[in-house]
Amino acid sequence: MGHDQGRSYTDLEIEGQEWEELIFKVLQAPEFQEYVEGENSNVYYKRQEKLLKEYLTGKGYPMIGSLWCSFIWWNDRDVNYLPSEVHQLLAECLKIQKNTENVYALSALEKLIAACNEALKINSGLCLLTD
């Protein structure tokens, strides 16, 4: 954990395989659908995002569903959680952690849990930065 201009940060990085195992293997989110003929990439990605968020919210993981942009390599949007949302993200991570033995997903969850705990210590929100 470090500090820079009043901001705290961790040097935790969740790798692509960790995201994929968590979202698609453990949470069993549907794989991406095919492009619709004539569909531009922005429309395609928005459609995929909507489907994934709806699926994960339906399974009881709306905060995890917000992580959509973090694990997609072509996306450059950071994910922000308000201080009031960090507790829910932590609860979702802990619930998933109890029900999986997938080492890659567990690694991602441990990092998210550590980040949530650090944010809670200082009553802060959380920002997950993309590469």
Image (tube, rainbow, N blue to C red):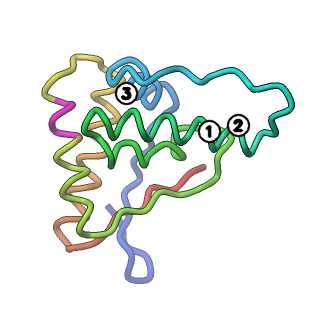
Horizontal and vertical percent for residue 95? 15, 35
Residue at image x 64%, y 46%?
A: 75
Q: Which secondary structure is most common in the magenta stretch? A: helix
Residue bearing the label numbered 2: 44
- Secondary element under disc 2, as helix, strand or loop, is helix
Q: Along the polypeptide, which appears first: circle 1 or circle 3?
A: 3
Verify CB contact (< 8 Å) between mark 1 and mark 2.
yes
Q: Which residues are magenta?
A: 93-97
Residue bearing the label numbered 3: 22
Q: In the picture provided, is 42 more to the left or to the right than 79? A: right
**Is the residue 31 above or below the residue 8 in the image?**
above
Q: Nearer the viewer, mark 1 or mark 3?
A: 1
Residue type, label 2: Tyr
Question: Does the magenta portion include 78?
Answer: no
Horizontal and vertical percent for residue 21? 41, 22
Towards the viewer: 64 or 107: 64
